[in-house]
């Protein structure tokens, strides 16, 4: 439902990767390791209630750090949405992308402070609220 790519691939390649990786992850049992190999990359996933969060990384990257990034993303979404569920992501996907963009830049962790991420999100929310307030136009003086 939510996908962020940091490499250039055609839509056809992306669809194939999503299909293949989804099948691999869903076929695994709950007690199995959260890491698997797919072609020349590592797949790191974690299940939170009914949601699966899946990240792909280079074969040389540390999968535990990737798992921690996934966990931080879920924590931030929980704080914003209040126990995030699939419907929160579906109906407010732009905020889910914004939270991810605050954490990651070009596929690398940009901000490790949870407080700073939440502060940026609340500032962005207040900017959105200000944009939605209609401007009052003063009536011209009649003489």
Image: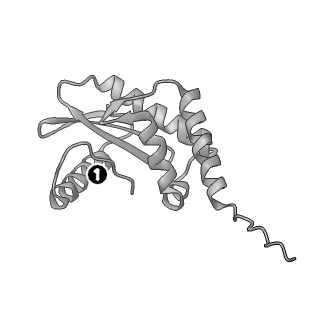
Image quadrant containing the N terminus: bottom left
How many marks overall? 1
Please state if 40 lies on the left or on the right of 107 as rendered: left
Quadrant where the image shows the C terminus:
bottom right
Q: Residues within 10 Å of mark 1 (few under 14, many from 20)?
A: few
Kind of element beneath mark 1: helix
Residue 112 appears left or right of 79: left
Residue drawn where x is 16% and y is 61% of the image: 12
Most extreme residue toward the left is: 39
Can residue 3 be seen here? yes
**View extreme (right): residue:** 143
Eyeballing the image, is 112 above or below 71?
above
**Left or right, 53 with reference to 49:** left
Considering depth in this image, is 55 or 21 the residue closer to the camera? 55
Q: Quadrant of residue 104?
A: top left
State whether residue 15 is above or below residue 33: below
Q: In x, y percent, where is residue 9?
A: 16, 52
Point out residue 18 in the picture as x, y percentages from the top left corner: 25, 53
Q: Residue at x 34, y 23 (%)?
A: 64
- Tell me if residue 47 can be seen: no
Please indicate whether residue 54 sits to the left or right of residue 17 in the image: right
Where does label 1 land, which residue?
22
């Amino acid at each position: 439902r939510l996908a962020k790519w940091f490499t250039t691939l055609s839509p056809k390649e992306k669809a194939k990767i999503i299909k293949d990786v989804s099948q691999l992850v869903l076929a695994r049992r709950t007690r199995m390791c959260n890491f698997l190999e797919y072609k020349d990359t590592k797949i790191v996933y974690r299940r939170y209630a009914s949601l699966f969060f899946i990240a792909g990384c280079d074969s040389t990257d540390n999968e535990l750090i990737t798992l921690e990034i996934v966990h931080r993303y879920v924590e931030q979404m929980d704080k914003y949405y209040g126990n995030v569920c699939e419907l929160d992501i579906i109906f407010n996907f732009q905020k889910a992308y914004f939270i991810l963009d605050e954490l990651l830049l070009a596929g690398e962790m940009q901000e490790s402070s949870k407080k700073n991420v939440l502060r940026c999100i609340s500032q962005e929310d207040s900017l959105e609220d200000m944009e939605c307030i209609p401007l009052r136009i003063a009536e011209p003086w009649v003489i």
